[in-house]
Image (cartoon, rainbow, N blue to C red):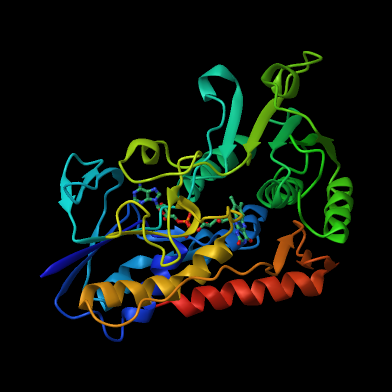
Amino acid sequence: MKRLVLAGAGHAHALLLKAWAAAPPPGVELVLVSPQALAPYSGMVPGWLAGHYRYEDICVDFAPLVAANRARWLADELLGVQPGQRRLRLRSGATLDYDLLSLNLGSTLTPPLAASLPELQLLPLRPLAQLHTAWQATQAALASPTDDRPLHLCGVGAGAAGVESLLALCHWLARACPRRQVRASLLGQSTELLPGMAPGAQRSARRALRRAGVELRLGSSFDAARDCGSGSGEPATRLLVWAAGAQAHAWQRDCGLAVCGQGFIRIDAQLRSVSHPEVYAVGDCAAWATPLPKAGVHAVRMAPVLAHNLRVALAQQGQVIDHRPQARFLALLALGDRRAVAAWGNWSAEGDWAWRWKDRIDRGFLRRVAA
Ligand SMILES: Cc1cc2nc3c(=O)[nH]c(=O)nc-3n(C[C@H](O)[C@H](O)[C@H](O)COP(=O)(O)OP(=O)(O)OC[C@H]3O[C@@H](n4cnc5c(N)ncnc54)[C@H](O)[C@@H]3O)c2cc1C
């Protein structure tokens, strides 16, 4: 019996398990390696931070998907691949051999070390799975009824995740801590807000940030002393929200698979590792020949191709197909207050209708992958 290991509870693996549930590939032992069964759906993360959704409402539950495939869920974390031996190293100390491997592990962020920033709440937005615990700790610290010191909120990263998350946090703070005086700023290394997005969407985001009282500092690198230091010496709580650029998981760099300069796994048009064709990689953890933005839509689009090509590889018959990434996609950016901006190429428009549209699409995705 062949063993196919799916590592990571990402968007593409959710769709693959849903698609296979009616007829799992015969004669195959299917194993999902993921520390948690609940995986947050990224599109709804800003709405959850703002308080519009509960955590359970924004998660894909992999337990029933795995059961529907008569597969096995291994609650563990991948720490390395030995592609020569077709073996995985896991955090528990165990190893797991595979015949075919599919990686859908997302990406991570490397914020400054918390120890170097005393008296600072640190909220890194990736990995998404750890955001739940980090946000609970932050909420508990900020909403303390005995602490009404001013709050300095600093967001780093002026891309979509940084803008949406900072606006969401401002919305949540205004309701959860109304007595607190909040001073918020958003820093971006680029001189452009939402680089590459429609100019109208950039203007909408600027207006929303201004309405929320956020000072925008573009073309500026993070400086702990300047951006999170005590400044005037006034007693204040400091929250640093880190959303600066998706990075590859550190172990990917020397895992023996071919990787790009940033450590993402290089794949071919059929989504296979260019060095080890029995390994597939999709979504954020993969490097397409021409770099793709790290967005969930790419992981979603890769899913049917992955499901098809893995089935062909397992059966050793049929024709594999190529993935063709979309050049443009609809972006729907939440603006904190149940409004959103929609952007497609150079077109954009803003309103509460865009939030309802986004909400419908996002809930639709979760319904699509519910077992
Ligand atoms: C706040 C925020 C908002 C965003 N909003 C949008 C949006 O609206 N639209 C959009 O297209 N993109 C959005 N993105 C980008 C999006 O999050 C990513 O591009 C998307 O999640 C990538 O999907 P994925 O399937 O590759 O991985 P993920 O969805 O990140 O899933 C990876 C999975 O792998 C697991 N994992 C990680 N490491 C290991 C390991 N070593 N062993 C086992 N399992 C592991 C994780 O726990 C996780 O379950 C947003 C990002 C952020 C931070």
Query: What number of labels is visible?
Result: 0
Image height of 238 relative to 100, above or below? above
Is 128 displayed left or right of 122 in the figure?
Answer: left
Between residue 265 and residue 175, name the one nearer to us. 265
Image height of 278 relative to 368, above or below? above
Between residue 215 and residue 171, name the one nearer to us. 215
Image height of 339 relative to 370, above or below? above
Image height of 212 relative to 70, above or below? above
Is 144 displayed left or right of 55 in the figure?
Answer: right
- Residue at figure coordinates x 55%, y 64% from the top left: 298
Residue projecting furthest to the left: 1
Q: Is residue 14 visible?
A: yes
Q: Position of residue 281 (x, y in %)?
A: 39, 58
Q: Position of residue 220 (x, y in %)?
A: 77, 29
Residue projecting furthest to the top: 233
Q: Is residue 144 visible?
A: no
Task: State which quarter of the image contains the C terminus.
Answer: bottom left
Quarter holding residue 216: top right
Between residue 4 and residue 292, name the one nearer to us. 292
Between residue 353 and residue 110, name the one nearer to us. 110
Is 203 displayed left or right of 148 in the figure?
Answer: right
- Residue at figure coordinates x 82%, y 38% from the top left: 191
Quarter holding residue 232: top right
Q: Position of residue 251 (x, y in %)?
A: 36, 37
Task: State which quarter of the image contains the N terminus.
Answer: bottom left
Q: Position of residue 168 (x, y in %)?
A: 70, 52
